[in-house]
Image (cartoon, rainbow, N blue to C red):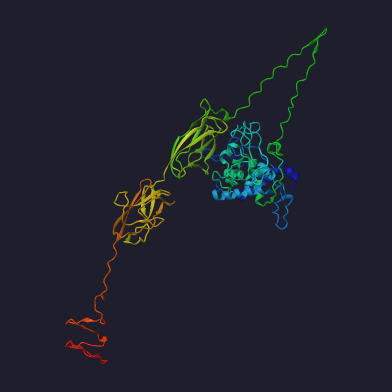
Amino acid sequence: MSAHFGSRLRKGAVNTTVAALAVAALAASQAPDVTADTPGGRTAADAPSGDSAAEGNATGGSATGNSPYYTDLPPLNSPVPSPTQSTGTTPTGAGGSETGIPATVLDAYKKAADALKASKPGCNMPWQLLAAIGKVESGQAGGGRVSADGTTLSPILGPVLNGVGFANISDTDHGAYDNDAVYDRAVGPMQFIPSTWAWAGRDGNGDGKKDPNNIYDAALAAGHYLCRYDWDMATTSGLRKAILSYNNSTEYYNTVLSWLEYYRKGTHEIPDGTGALPGNRSDGGAGKGTTPSPWSPSPTPPSTTTPPATTPPASKPGGGTTTPPATPPQKPTPPAPTTPTDTVDHLEAAGATKLTATAGAAFGEKISARAETKAGKGVAKVRIRFTVIGGDATFTGGESVATVQTDSAGVAVAPALRAGEKTGTFTVRATVVGRTVPALQYTATVAARAADALARTSSTALTCVAGGEFADQVEVKATYKGAAAGKVAATATLVAAAGGTTANDKGPYFKDAAGNRVRSLTDLRTDADGLLKLPKLYADDNAGTYLLSVTTTGGATLTVELTVTAPTPTTPDPSEGTPDPSEGTSDPSGGTSTSPSDGASKTPSGSTSASPSGSASTGS
């Protein structure tokens, strides 16, 4: 379908109808979900405030700062399948450059979706959603004008977010990403504002850098951003919340859904740089970019104010001229209205400033901060960023940074914080986005996982013959307050005495990797179910009763009795010591008689007689 028809398609009722049909079709394809979103509703931009994830945030509270986007809709025709290998030709018409996806850009979307399948499988991120957002944000990186590694050939920048028609977001990156040290601008093919990229940025192409101008980095970052609160893209409400968190506009949501539905029906790959540039921006402006890129925004129109006409000097009666009165002074232009952020003087803690948790567990309290004016009045609709510093704890969704908008009382409540495995103390810092005020610090302490009880999983007696090996391995289960205590550190020692910690120098032993005898094991850890199976035990030659002591972090202790028995004595063979009839016997007179098999027999008088064979015999 031609660009001309695509442009006409977006006017009037046709635009609304097409978007509505796409939304309805996609909604019907989603899994059922218990969350019912009202039509036209809005969702949180960076993080849910309090317990509601469906309340709207102020302009600027999104990945893009709610920058303008492209409203071009897909054609009514279904996409043409990918070109066959036999022909190698690129389809045209509905499947041509207007709706095809440049090769490198398409590869970036698919690789990002594959990575999310592994890291956040519950998100169910389809690559087509990334493609739909990329289409709406930048026309697939400006028609696929990217280098081999995925970096745009020229910057793609949104309008200056100076509050004139857009959000008012003061500079947060010193111009590093957007070349503007006064205000922020959305950057790159997925249009991240610098303050969001600072925590959401990812390295998608493995070059060691996080570049918002690289489609691999930007696509992966967009996927993580959309999945950060465990929203499920396979459900209607999860998909809606995620899209609206990217750009908080119902029209934006409908446009993205239109392209998502289109791409799900099928799309095709086109060469890099051959994609069509979109032509309709939501604010009526020109394309995004920087001079001399073809995406450069329209130059500021020349001033249309007509200068005051020069009045010729008036003639005086009788000759001469009269100097005209001076132009009356102009009224000063009133200052631009300030944003709520501009009125913030400081931050105050709205809850606990010291938190504790066990490794791997959620902290019992949420961190909250209140934005206040100099007079101490709470300021609503201010974005506060919470950042974990020095620890491996994460907020809901697995991120170490969360941005939350203050409520009507000026309070922002951070998402639930979950401790990692690193023990000790770390800091959570709260700052105001877009304004420099002293940061607020919260101290969080993570204690090691612990158990308060240990028990064997079997009641079988543990016995072994000296010099042998125990048939059964010792297995224990650790619990804490009755629940399985997973990943708890433990030690196992064959102790010399009950209640002691000194290892015995004899009796049962373990073996190390080299086969050496070991009677104390450290660095053990229970599994996720609290179970710990010790290595096989062996016995030396010392019989007796021995003790195995197992202890865990938290003080749980279990003593296991091991019995080593002496080898069973060997019973003599009853046949041993009995003369063999075939062997010679002693004669009472001291001589030796031979068996009948020797050819002679003893006579009653003690003489020998000739054998039946006739050999001679000799008297005694």
Q: Nearer the viewer, residue 599 or 41?
A: 599
Residue 190, quarter of picture: top right
Residue 299 showing in the rendered view: yes
What residue is shown at x 62% (from left), y 27% (from top)?
A: 337
479 with respect to 230 (left or right):
left
| Closest to the observer, 109 or 58 | 109
Residue 572: where, in percent of width, then height? 26, 71
Q: Is residue 240 visible?
A: no
Question: Which quadrant does the C terminus fall into?
Answer: bottom left
Q: Nearer the viewer, residue 444 or 163?
A: 444
Image quadrant assignment for residue 566:
bottom left
All told, the count of numbered labels is: 0
Q: Residue at x 60, y 46 (%)?
A: 205
Left or right, 549 with reference to 422: left
- Quadrant in which residue 422 is drawn: top left
Residue 120 or residue 336, whichever sits in front? 120
List x then y, in percent, for residue 29. 62, 51
Is 12 displayed left or right of 52 in the figure?
right
Relative vertical location of residue 598 with respect to residue 525 in this rendering, above or below = below
Name of the residue lying farthest toward the bottom: 614
Residue 392: x %, y % from top left? 48, 42
Q: Position of residue 9 (x, y in %)?
A: 73, 44
